Amino acid sequence: VKNRVIPPEIISKYLQTCSQLKVTVKKFLKQEDEDKAMRIANMELSKATNMIQHEEEIFSRPARQFMSKEAPKTKALKKKKQKKLQGEDFEQKKEHAFVKREARRTTRPQKNQSSGRRRS
């Protein structure tokens, strides 16, 4: 990296140019903010006029119905209760679940468990 000396006249010239540009940039930013506010006001105005013009049509529509997240769960639980396994089938299912859990435990890496003391 080379050290260069810049004459003070050039620095003052660019400082003056920057200060002039600063004023123009502020004007542009202010104009953009005003335009944005105007767009929002126009949007709200058109929304209000549409609500007034089409009020009867809007309120005559049936209310929206959303699916409840609980409905599928409760259906599944009801089916499960109806299918409840009994006797040998139940024991086989239980044993199969145990074998799966045990296989997962053996393949999982062991955590390094210390005596519960923290290092300081």
Image (cartoon, helix red, strand yellow):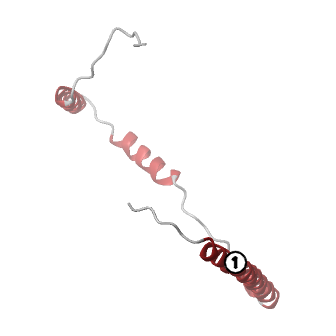
Q: For residue 48, which quarter of the picture?
A: bottom right
- Residue at x 32% of width, y 12% of height: 114
Give coordinates of residue 52: x percent, y percent.
Answer: 82, 87
Q: For residue 22, which quarter of the picture?
A: bottom right
Between residue 70 and residue 75, name the one nearer to us: 70
Q: How many marks?
A: 1
Q: For residue 83, which quarter of the picture?
A: top left
Residue 40 vertical position relative to residue 88 in the rendered view, above or below: below
Residue 70 vertical position relative to residue 54 in the rendered view, above or below: above
- Residue at x 51% of width, y 66% of height: 5
Q: Which residue is mark 1?
A: 16
Query: Left of 111 or right of it: where is 55?
Result: right
Give coordinates of residue 44: x percent, y percent.
Answer: 77, 82
Q: Residue reaching furthest bottom?
A: 53
Query: Left of 120 or right of it: where is 56?
Result: right
Query: Left of 112 or right of it: where is 4?
Result: right
Give coordinates of residue 97: x percent, y percent.
Answer: 23, 32
- Residue at x 39% of width, y 40% of height: 81
Give coordinates of residue 4: x percent, y percent.
Answer: 47, 66
**Quadrant location of the C terminus?**
top left
Residue type at mark 1 is: Gln
Secondary structure, mark 1, is: helix
Between residue 57 and residue 104, name the one nearer to us: 104
**Quadrant location of the N terminus?**
bottom left
Between residue 46 and residue 33, name the one nearer to us: 33
Residue neighbourhood size for the residue with mark 1, other residues' Cα within 10 Å, grouped as few (<14), some (14–19), many (≥20): few
